[in-house]
Amino acid sequence: MLSIGEFSKICGVSTKTLRYYAEIGLINPDEINPENGYRYYSIRQLKKMLFINRLKSYHFSLEEIKTIMEWEDDQSEEKLGIVLNRKRREIQEKLNAFEYTLKQMSNDILNLEKGISIMSYLGDIEVQLVEIQPMNILYMRQMMTSDDYALGYGTYFGRLYEKIATEKLTLLGTPMTIYHSPEYNPAGNDTEFAIPIKEPVKGTRDLPGGLCAKSVLKGPYSELTSVYAMLREWVENEGYKLVSSPYEVYVTDPNQASAAEGMITEVYFPVKKK
């Protein structure tokens, strides 16, 4: 048996953390002395602790790790392969985002050295007034937190595409998201996922046509706030006002874009003259 201090030293985990892990049921000491409360871990628990550390290094949450630890032995390897692949994709997406950020920072540094404002890119965002035809959309509407979006997009669009395939419906466009909340709220935003289709079946509605201020983003979704800001400024300067919720149309599938710069998103602000 190893004392909590010895176990802590070998595994590189503080005794405070080990006590917390025991509190949440992640890894419990094999023995607790009833007289003095000293905690002892068995040699075989070293492997378990190293496994927990490895999963932590892969950025799994403690809740996710606890779930993995509770799997039945005959299913664990197959399930672990699935979740590791999913986590690898998540990390790769973050790496891609960091690479784009580094490239963006390098460009900003070069611009500053040339005496050019790092906000000069806003001048490259073009806005045009377009007439949009009415659309029949298959939709799902959910309250989404800021943490939900990454997984939510795949989940809800996946369900819509599944319905389209099952009922042999006719696609008329690419996926779109309509934002109904009057203001941004990290705790939850009224979000509608939609895909234009031909048939007016259950679960569809009419998206009215009309005038829209439109801008196109070629780059990662993190740049959308700049597009929204310039669209709002254009609407005000040109004497228009918003008449319904803004929406985004995803021209390219982010999973098929070779780089962030290859992602194309159209942003529409439905408007009318003041």
Image (cartoon, helix red, strand yellow):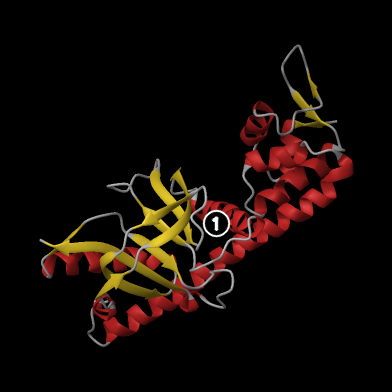
- Classify residue 240 as left or right of residue 65: left
How many labels sit on residues? 1
Quadrant where the N terminus is found in the figure = top right
x%, y% of residue 37?
Answer: 72, 17
For residue 10, say whether it is visible: no
The picture quadrant where one finds residue 117 is bottom left
| Quadrant of res 95 | bottom right
Query: Which residue is pictured at 26% across the width and 62% down the height?
Result: 270
Q: Residue at x 36, y 65 (%)?
A: 224
Determine whether the residue tagged by mark 1 lies in a helix, strand or loop: helix
Where residue 19 sits in the image (x, y, percent)?
65, 29
- Compare residues 124 and 67 and report the one nearer the observer: 124
Image quarter in which the C terminus is found: bottom left
Looking at the image, which residue is at 60% across and 61% down? 91
Image x and y of residue 146, in percent: 43, 49
Amino acid type at mark 1:
Phe
**Which residue in the structure is indicated by mark 1?**
157
Where residue 175 appears, x then y in whole percent? Answer: 49, 63
